[in-house]
Image: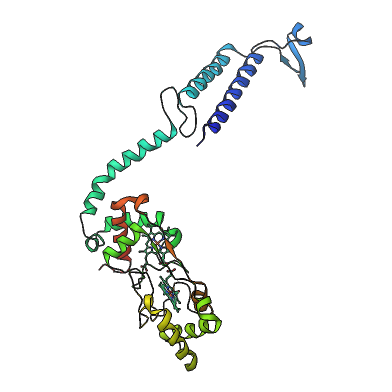
Amino acid sequence: MSSAWSWYVTVLSLANILACVWLIRWTAKKRPGEAAASDTTGHEWDGLKEYNNPMPRWWLGLFYITIVFALGYLLLYPGLGNFKGLLGWTQVGAYEAEVEAVERDVAPLFAKYAALPIPELAKDPAAMATGRRLFVTNCAVCHGADGHGSRGFPNLADTIWHWGGAPEQIEQTITQGRTGMMMAWGAALGEDGVKAVATYVRSLGGHAGDPAQVAAGQEKYQTFCIACHGPAGKGNPMLGAPDLTDDYWLYGGSEQIIQTSIRDGRQGVMPAQKDLLGAERIHVLAAYVYGLSHEQP
Ligand code: HEC
Ligand code: HEC
């Protein structure tokens, strides 16, 4: 955060403190003018008159103490972000010290978890409670609080994997991130080709279509698609190319949507978590994700 904001807050605070000083000094004296000559201010309510007395000194004294305190506080804890006080205290520094203290507390726990293989760890209720908290904080925005995903964001609680569901594969997905690269085929196939190949792809998942279309689509499929999705449409976890025969669709399985997937391509991005979370937390998360599709007795 730029120090301009800290200056802004500091100047505003100082102006307020000075205004208080002025106000207190003003109330410390008898009111001047006409009223100065008499004992009352001239204000009167139903026979009650307001005396023209200054505030009691002990009471003003308390105000002065709060002002001295405010000035002292401003000098010691001046502002936002990295703005330093007389003690060298900063908000950022205080935050970092707190994070460090928490890290010190949890480090032995994560070190213990790091030594356990993922399937073992998935059976440890305490580790899974930690995993769940990490998941809700870091992953739920995209994959849902229960890991069931939504269109474009894969369900992690089922047994269908684009990038593989083995413990090491899950851990690598989270650590390195993944980008599904399915280019647009509209230009290469033409609109008729897109429709035919979509009909063929749907037939792989058990949705019967016009046999002539299916045959034409299959021919195109063999030319353009097998490199990634395989000759039988079973996919390839090395490329994140989905199995097209399981009737599970990341982007939707209607004719229209499959045509769109083929015509325009798809590039789903799973962001790498390595630098955000570190290896030990990722290990616990991988176990949590693994556990979602491997019910523990
Ligand atoms: C910004 C959204 C986003 C966030 C945050 C996110 N993911 Fe993902 N994740 C995705 C997308 C999109 C994919 C699918 C990538 C693709 O199309 O291949 C994915 C894929 C995955 C996969 C692979 C699924 C498969 O079928 O192989 C796993 C495992 C996964 N994410 C776990 C996590 C975990 C654990 C976290 C939290 C640390 C997380 N993700 C955070 C968007 C996200
Ligand atoms: C270079 C490899 C590659 C080629 C070639 C390729 N695909 Fe894909 N395809 C992918 C990947 C990777 C994804 C997943 C994209 C993502 O996760 O965002 C995908 C996704 C899809 C989907 C969406 C699946 C879903 O779950 O919603 C369809 C449909 C599809 N491809 C059909 C085809 C067809 C038909 C062809 C041939 C015309 C083809 N693909 C060629 C890699 C490829």
Above or below for 120 versus 187? above
User: So how many labels did they put on this image?
Assistant: 0
Viewer-closest of 62 and 224: 224
62 to 259, vertically: above or below: above
Quadrant of picture, ligand 2: bottom left
Residue 236 % position (x, y): 34, 74
Query: Residue at the location (44% across, 22% down)?
Result: 86
Compared to residue 106, the image places residue 139 above or below, namely below
Q: Is residue 28 left or right of residue 210?
A: right
Q: Position of residue 84 (x, y in %)?
A: 45, 27
Query: Relative to 49, is 143 on the left or the right?
Result: left
Q: Residue at x 74, y 8 (%)?
A: 36
* Residue 125 locus on image (x, y percent): 27, 58
Q: Which corner quadrant of the image does residue 131 belong to?
A: bottom left
Near-viewer residue (189 or 237): 189
Quarter of the image holding residue 153? bottom left
Q: Going by the picture, which residue comes out furthest to the bottom?
A: 211
> Which quadrant does the C terminus fall into?
bottom left
Q: Is residue 143 visible?
A: no
Write the residue at 32% across / 41% down: 102
Left or right: residue 122 versus residue 80 is left
Is 1 located above or below residue 276 in the figure?
A: above
Determine if residue 259 is in view.
Answer: yes
Pick the residue in front: 99 or 84: 84
- Residue furthest top in the image: 37
Q: Residue furthest right?
A: 34
The residue at 41%/85% (across/down) is 204
Q: Position of residue 183 (x, y in %)?
A: 46, 71
Residue 64, image quadrant = top right
